[in-house]
Image (tube, rainbow, N blue to C red):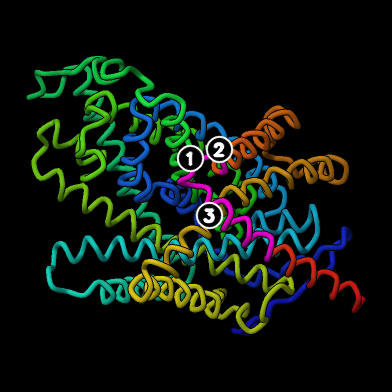
Amino acid sequence: MSRTTAPARADRQDGTTAPAEGLSHGLKQRHLSMIALGGVIGAGLFVGSGAGIAAAGPSIVVAYAISGVLVMLVMRMLGEMSAANPASGSFSVHAERAFGPWAGFTSGWAFWFLLCVAVGLEGIGAANIMTGWFPGTPEWAWVLLFMVVFCGTNLAAVKNFGEFEFWFAALKVGAIVLFLGIGVLAITGLLPGTDDIPGTSNLLGDHGFFPNGSEGLIVGLLASVFAYGGLETVTIAAAESEHPVQGVAKAVRTAMWRIALFYIGSMAVIVTLVPWDDPAVVEKGPYVATLDFLGIPAAGQIMNVVVLVALLSAMNANVYGASRMARSLIARGQGPRAVGRTYGGVPRPAVLLSSVVGFGAVLLSYWSPDKAFIWLLNTIGAIILVVWFFIAASQLVLRRRTQREAPEKLVVRMWGFPYLTWVALAGMAGIFYLMAVEEGTRVQLYATGALTLVLAAVGFGLQKARAAKG
């Protein structure tokens, strides 16, 4: 077998094109399960959730529950399609099969851009922690070091990525389980040294469960939606597992309820133990504030280690996800072919491109933090919702097609089809509306909308050009 594999295309009966995978299959079930759990547990939960708590108060639990239901529906739909047709392009391939190449192009490249910018953001966050431990060291040097390390792990065999992500995710999951255990013991009065238990005073006192009314709940809801982003990576990784169909089915089933438990459970513990308007919730992060309240020694440094692991894990996963999405798109004729080549079962040019673009976002944060970098942040603000919309719309089309042509492939089925799919679409439309009426998120919505329209226009152009050539 040749060590270098050029991406090829095979025409489907429905007119779309399928990539010849050319990828290795080195991921095991334990890798997939931890990628599913760890990919979504990042700094957005450990640190960013503090802003949601400050806005929504105790009702942040309701916000995370609502968005958690939406995420579970989306992942069930994606699990159904990915188990029926595993592909490293995941939802991009499904969108292409459902609506044509333009839809795969739009959703795929938008997600690739999101992941690349996210790699840069996570690198900056990790560098901030390291400079706190090693004062005087330049942030860019730490980011460069992390980029080199994770670019290297992704350039090697996929099993190396799987092992890194397995242990990173295991540490994050272990930290949350330990936090939940300590929190429950404290709430029930069983934790040594916690004589002053607040009971329900933090939940129902100080302006009640909805201290800032519906407006605060809306802000918390928007914050919680974006905190759930990252689950999609497991369906991308499934194409490189030993048993793609069984692997993605099991990973999606087990991950959904566990992640909902971790997120909703964490928020419930935090707002029960700590006053929602305590400045420490935002300044230190909600987890550190809770551990400080309980008198856990060195709480700040413990959580800094956990957050650092979360950031590095997300960098690792996002470089992987971006490279596989780019490779899949190029294999379907939607990008420069040289970047889509695989070497030893790894799309190394795509890994390098994704890493370089991610580091470019870091440089923008230093060169133009008030203009170009802020523009990047706003542009990716609602991309995850665009991706979810494509997933739900694609599932409506592909479910009926699969039932008609190959019902045996439906090893994972969306609940209450088609009604719950329409409920999910209505929920996304509602969030888009809330973003439009909220001043703080309106710019993100418009910037993401502009990027989506540009990509769709380019995708339509390429599709027409290909059709004209016959």
Q: Secondary structure at mark 1?
A: helix
Residue located at (22% from left, 28% from top): 274
Does label 1 or label 2 sit earlier along the sequence? 1
Residue 242 seen from this side:
no
Give the percent coordinates (x, y) of residue 292. Answer: 14, 37
Q: For this rendering, which residue is in front, 333 or 409?
A: 333
Quadrant of residue 97 within the rendered picture: bottom right
Q: CA distance from mark 3 to mark 1?
A: 21 Å
Q: Secondary structure at mark 2?
A: helix
Residue tagged 3:
233
Residue tagged 2:
434
Quadrant (top left, top right, bottom left, bottom right) of the C terminus: bottom right
> Mark on residue 39?
none
Give the percent coordinates (x, y) of residue 77. Answer: 66, 41
Residues under numbered marks 1 and 2 in contact, where contact means CB atoms less than 8 Å apart:
yes
Residue located at (38% from left, 30% from top): 56
Q: Which residue type does callout 1 highlight?
A: Leu
Residues under numbered marks 3 and 2 in contact, where contact means CB atoms less than 8 Å apart:
no
Residue 50 seen from this side:
yes
Relative placement, left or right, of 108 versus 277 is right
* Residue stretch in magenta: 436-454
